[in-house]
Image (cartoon, grey):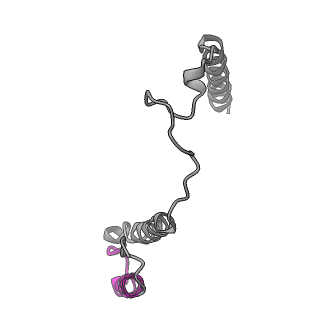
Amino acid sequence: MNMILFMMISSLALSIALTALNFWLSQMNPDSEKLSPYECGFDPLGSARLPFSIRFFLVAILFLLFDLEIALLLPLPWATQLDSPTITLTWTSTLILLLTLGLIYEWIQGGLEWAE
């Protein structure tokens, strides 16, 4: 208990000290170049509020969906050491089949085509 309390107090003190040091040493003199929306060396020509295509968001959501589903398959090498690996194989096959059907559905619907 004493060691845990010491570690919590020391980590809190270190966090507060580093945050205070950051605020104390940082430069707080913004100029017009730093306050501009672009820092690439030239003035913006048009509006910065250009509409994005919904395809960007669709591809990002599909990537997250399939990426998170694949993360469910990562512990499978350790699951084969269980008493009944047949159940593990069944659930794995079901998950891979579900992912494949979802990919085929998105492919048929045209969700994976970038240009129309």
Q: Tell me which residue sits at (34%, 68%) in the image.
A: 78
The x, y position of residue 107, in whole percent, is: 36, 83
Chain part drawn in magenta: 79-108
Residue sitting at x 62%, y 18%: 30
As for residue 85 lying within the magenta part, the answer is yes
Position of 69 with respect to 2 (left or right) is left
- Identify the residue at horizontal 42%, vertical 71% (top origin): 66
Q: Quadrant of the image for the N terminus? A: top right
Image quarter hosting the C terminus: bottom left
Give the main secondary structure of the magenta stretch: helix
Position in image of residue 92 (x %, y %): 37, 81
Residue 75 image offset from top left, x and y in percent: 38, 67
Q: Is residue 30 above or below residue 37?
A: above
Relative to 2, is 82 above or below? Answer: below
Q: Is residue 92 above or below residue 28?
A: below
Residue situated in front as seen by the camera: 46 or 31: 46
The percent position of residue 52, horizontal first and vertical second, equals 52, 60
Q: Quadrant of residue 12?
A: top right
At 36% across and 84% down in the image, what residue appears?
Answer: 100
> In the picture, residue 63 is in which quadrant?
bottom left
Quarter assignment of residue 8: top right
Q: Nearer the viewer, residue 112 or 99?
A: 112
* Count of picture labels: 0
- In the image, farthest residue toward the top: 25
48 inside magenta stretch: no
| Camera-side residue of 102 and 95 | 102
82 sits to left or right of 61: left
